[in-house]
Image (cartoon, helix red, strand yellow):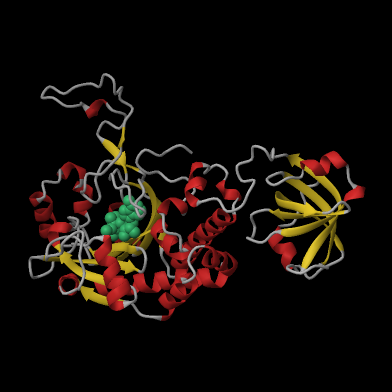
Amino acid sequence: MERTNEAVKDLLQSEALNREVIVKGWVRTRRGKKSVNFIALNDGSTIHNIQIVVEVDQFDEDLLKSVTTGAAIGVRGTLVASQGKGQHVEIQASEITLYGEANPNEYPLQKKGHSLEFLREIAHLRFRTNTFGAVTRLRHAMSFAIHKYFNDHRFYYLHTPIITGSDAEGAGEMFRVTTLNMENPPGRQNGGIDFSQDFFGKETNLTVSGQLEAELGAMALSKVYTFGPTFRAENSNTPRHLAEFWMVEPEMAFYDNDDNMDLAEDFTQYLVGYALENCYDDLEFLNNMYDNQLLDRLRFVVDNTYERITYTRAVEILEGADQKWEFPVEWGVDLQAEHEKYLVEQYFKKPVIVVDYPREIKAFYMKQNEDGQTVRAMDVLFPKIGEVIGGSQREEVYSKLNQRIEELGIPKEQLWWYLETRKYGTAPHSGFGLGFERLMLFISGLSNIRDVIPFPRTPNNAEF
Ligand code: 4AD
Ligand code: MG
């Protein structure tokens, strides 16, 4: 059969009826009586299937027997107004080509309604489900919208390295990259491994963030962003953490932290609005299937401004809350998911941006406030998710940044180039990181981060 097939999505919306069409995809179901069969065919272009009407006596019996759930077929036929309910058009089949059968006794997706946990075990096939089709299309739409937003606002897309020699967050949670023979690595005289003999002549790791390199770009192009995979070897087996996740990191010269927050708010509202406008069918499906408040929650975020409070105020609220915490709160501790959720869902009932965190719990590069205790950090907290964005104004004063790096004992040979931006034409600047999968959790209404990325990397899991 020719390659001139049309997408199911286009056919379902087509006004040009009574013409010959070709459609190709995977069978969702075949049902019907002796004389007429109905095939529900899906090609991934939409959550909806197209109905193929088959006059049984016009086709080979063995061929039709092989048209079972999961099989790949091509259909030539006439696109007509549908006789039945539930669809506007259907195809009267004149020719069917079987590309690949799916043995009904073995095909794992023979029946509907599998749990998300089970689908994770068959990640190689779960694209075929309604849920994962919707998630995949939404990921695509959100990626596209991210590039569109930044392009429309004169940001330049910067490709930052995946293999790095520095620890951008200073948290020491990195995956090492090496070509040394790990069974017998070259040693140094005073003990340890001699990485000068490694591929890059130094110790290297997978990046935890593209921020430091993005800052270099912002110091020339004014507004840049990165959007790529980042890696963290934190052993947190939670529904919100991945070892490999995608991060969007805008970085803007001449922005202070208020400008930074304005951008974060406008950007996230744009993305949610884009999903509502362009992905309604998929969102409606997810709303009906998993979370019947999803659509309301999405609209709510677009329609309301975010609350902005200081960390100190957040701690006061949490200390005064009539609530038992698993992790007790006091000034100086990092906020946990339970605290973030309380602020967003119970107290303010809208997204919250928390600013001015204690310097001891935040990264070395953040701009220090005059109080000597806090830094100009800002985290955006969303309902159901908690932290979706982490960002800050950056310390642009050479002496202060240098002092902080020394205080924390960060090896300067890793960061000399970063410090140089503060020597030559330094300028106030700010930026943030949006966890793409955290955003996808919010947009999809699903509750486990493993279900919003095709191939999740988590402790003890890298099968597919
Ligand atoms: O708050 P984080 O650690 O900030 C940074 O990495 C900064 N360099 C960003 C910047 O200012 N350019 O991470 C940013 C976001 C978090 O708010 C969260 O949404 C997401 O990345 N994130 C994770 N998502 C999934 N799995 C993990 N293990 C994550 N760790 C962080
Ligand atoms: Mg953070």
Position in image of residue 61 (x %, y %): 86, 42
Residues 173 and 348: in front is 348
Position in image of residue 355 (x %, y %): 22, 70
Left or right: where 211 falls relative to 33: left
Check the image and name the residue furthest to the top.
Answer: 184
Q: Residue at x 36, y 73 (%)?
A: 265
- Name the quarter showing ligand 2: bottom left
Position in image of residue 400 (x %, y %): 11, 59
Position in image of residue 23 (x %, y %): 76, 53
Q: Quadrant of residue 382?
A: bottom left
Q: Quadrant of residue 425?
A: bottom left
Q: Is residue 449 above or below residue 276?
A: above
Residue 395 in view in this figure: yes
Residue 215 in view in this figure: no
Check the image and name the residue furthest to the front.
Answer: 33
Check the image and name the residue furthest to the right.
Answer: 57
Left or right: where 422 falls relative to 252: left
Q: Residue at x 78, y 66 (%)?
A: 89
